Amino acid sequence: MDRSSLRFPALYLTRFAGGFGFITLVTLLGKYVDALAAATTVLGVTFSEGFVIGMFTTGFTLAQTAAVVPLAWAGDRYDKRLVLLSVMGLGVVAYAVFPLVSTPVGFVSARAFQGVAVTGMGLMSLALVGELSAPGTRANHIGKS
């Protein structure tokens, strides 16, 4: 088996791993809410428990929103593989931090890093699949990812 035949399965696995990590932590979100949800003070401003719980989800989504354009630009401007490896490394760090989180601010920050990693892995792996595919097979390869 030559190296070129391993390109697409590796990229498909990358997309799967990004989604799997996200879903795994979504299932644990309730446990984090029970353990960490409380009114908290950041820089002298007190946030209610409801706001903190909302930020547990919103931190992820806001980070995704903020990361899409810079990550897409970096992938177009520089090497997509390097950007993919960078966001994969960020994802590893983000997932390693979750067991160590002990404050609501720490959890929202970890969720933000997770959002950037999930977005970057999805964008770059799909962009690489499109780039590596021959024009006649591009739709088939993208559909499998």
Image: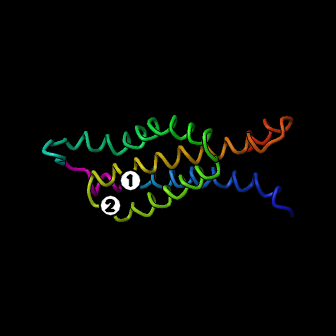
Q: Position of residue 117 (x, y in %)?
A: 50, 49
- Disc 1 element: helix
Tell me the quarter of the picture where residue 45 sits. Answer: top left
Magenta-colored stretch includes residue 37: yes
Q: Position of residue 25 (x, y in %)?
A: 45, 54
Residue at left offset 52%, top offset 55%: 21
Q: Earlier in the sequence, mark 1 or mark 2?
A: 2
- Nearest the viewer among 65 and 46 is 65
Q: Is residue 140 above or below residue 106?
A: above
Label 1 neighbour load within 10 Å: few <14, some 14-19, many 20+ = many
Residue at left offset 39%, top offset 62%: 97
Residue at left offset 83%, top offset 35%: 135
Q: Is residue 97 above or below residue 110?
A: below
Residue at left offset 59%, top offset 55%: 85
- The answer to whether residue 30 is left or right of residue 135 is left
Instruction: Give amino acid for label 2.
Output: Val
The magenta region covers 31-39
Which residue in the protein does label 2 denote? 101
Q: Which mark is residue 130?
A: none
Instruction: Give amino acid for label 1.
Output: Ala
C-beta proximity under 8 Å, tags 1 and 2:
yes
Q: Quadrant of the C terminus?
A: top right
Prevailing secondary structure of the magenta residues: helix
How far apart are the two marked residues, 1 and 2, measured between alpha carbons? Answer: 8 Å
Q: Quadrant of the N terminus?
A: bottom right
- The answer to whether residue 96 is left or right of residue 126 is left
- Disc 2 element: loop
Which residue in the protein does label 1 denote? 110
Q: Position of residue 126 (x, y in %)?
A: 67, 42
- Nearest the viewer among 88 and 30 is 88
